[in-house]
Image: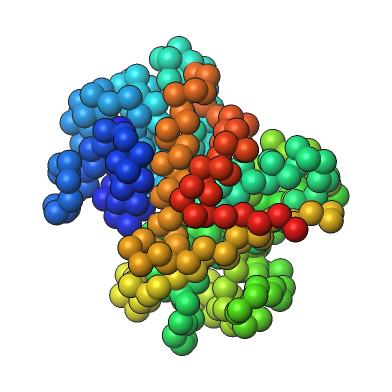
Amino acid sequence: MLVLGAGKMGIAIAHDLLKNNEEVRICDIVEKNIPNFFIIDANDEEKLLEEMKKEDVVISALPYEFNYKLAKLAIKAKANFIDLGGNSHIVEKELKLHEEAKKAGITIIPDCGLAPGMTNIISYHLWQSGVGEIHIRVGGLPQNPKPPLNYALFFSIKGLINEYLEDSIIVKDGKICKVESLTGIEEIEFFGFPSLEAFYTHGGTSTLPKTLKVRELDYKTIRYKGHAEKMKLLKDLGFFEKGAREFTEKILEKALPKDEKDVVLARIYGNDVEMELMDFHDGEFSAMQRTTGFSTAIIAKMIYDIKEGAYPPELVIDSDKFIKELQKRNIKWRKK
């Protein structure tokens, strides 16, 4: 397997695969002192294609804007391909490669991280049990928050801003519709934490509005109270718009703590059923690395048993097997 990108998520993916007896190479544009590493520029398509042809599975842990191009290269290389998703429009383009993937004899699965990814599979699991509405609440938080934003950077700053910038896709009264991100603030409680907030963000529902036939479906990101208001102010002042966005990303990347111990809180519920996850930094890997990277690694190992084509994870991943694999990694969803 080839992991593209040796950031926090890429390293977690490679670690889990190696631990579970897969042969893995990992690459990045910047030199990293890790096993089986080599340097490559993801913009060098000729070199990238050459490397992808050597592998059975290619995993993108790069920013989401690379994923459609990489999926097309995977078809040329005849290598299975998965990524972390993060942008619904790009995922939609990847899924349109279905027939090309079938002809090449490969499988493409975007959205294989935490949310979207793990939450898609858990949501589908609940829906199959007869739940008619799905509400998804997820957040990666510092265990010891520091003002003014009470947040730390646990994954790509580009992905974070994209979640806040683009509209959230939901289902209301059986119809797919859009709502503005950073709105719809609600109070949410988790044992051992102060009262938190949850609000609409982009990307979390991803393909679910089309794959689940439900009356209600929505996704909200969990943060410490006051975070949404500050981010909404930046957005309204134009700091997320083209031209200013790159500056904003650089400022936030510099200002936000990066090595804080974190926790991932997640709750998916509907009707009278609820599933909840609380996952903490394990001393070696952050909770975000564990829930995103390890989830991706599990799907990468399952891909050999999935028919050729391009699919969202909820339609092709066996949820019972997936949940059991998570439990082996001490990532435990509890049903209430």
Residue 276, can we see it?
yes
Which residue of the protein is positioned furthest toward the top in this rendering? Answer: 103
Q: Position of residue 125 (x, y in %)?
A: 69, 41
User: Which residue is at 60% across, 60% downward?
Assistant: 277
Q: Position of residue 109 (x, y in %)?
A: 49, 33
In the picture, the quarter occupied by the N terminus is top left
- Left or right, 241 with reference to 254: right
Between 133 and 231, the one nearer to me in the picture: 133
In the picture, the quarter occupied by the C terminus is bottom right
Q: Position of residue 25 (x, y in %)?
A: 23, 38
- Left or right, 278 with reference to 294: right
User: Which residue is at 65% across, 70% downward?
Assistant: 198
Q: Is residue 240 above or below residue 203?
A: below
Which residue of the protein is positioned furthest toward the bottom in this rendering? Answer: 147
The image quarter containing residue 45 is top left
User: Which residue is at 75% across, 37% downward?
Assistant: 128
Q: Position of residue 253 (x, y in %)?
A: 34, 71
Tell me the colour scheme of the image: rainbow
Between 205 and 137, the one nearer to me in the picture: 137
Residue 136, can we see it?
no
Counting every numbered tag in the picture gives 0
- Left or right, 201 with reference to 156: right
User: Which residue is at 75% across, 51% downward?
Assistant: 134
The image quarter containing residue 89 is top right
- Left or right, 139 with reference to 33: right
Q: Is residue 336 above or below residue 255?
A: above
Q: Is residue 189 above or below residue 73?
A: below
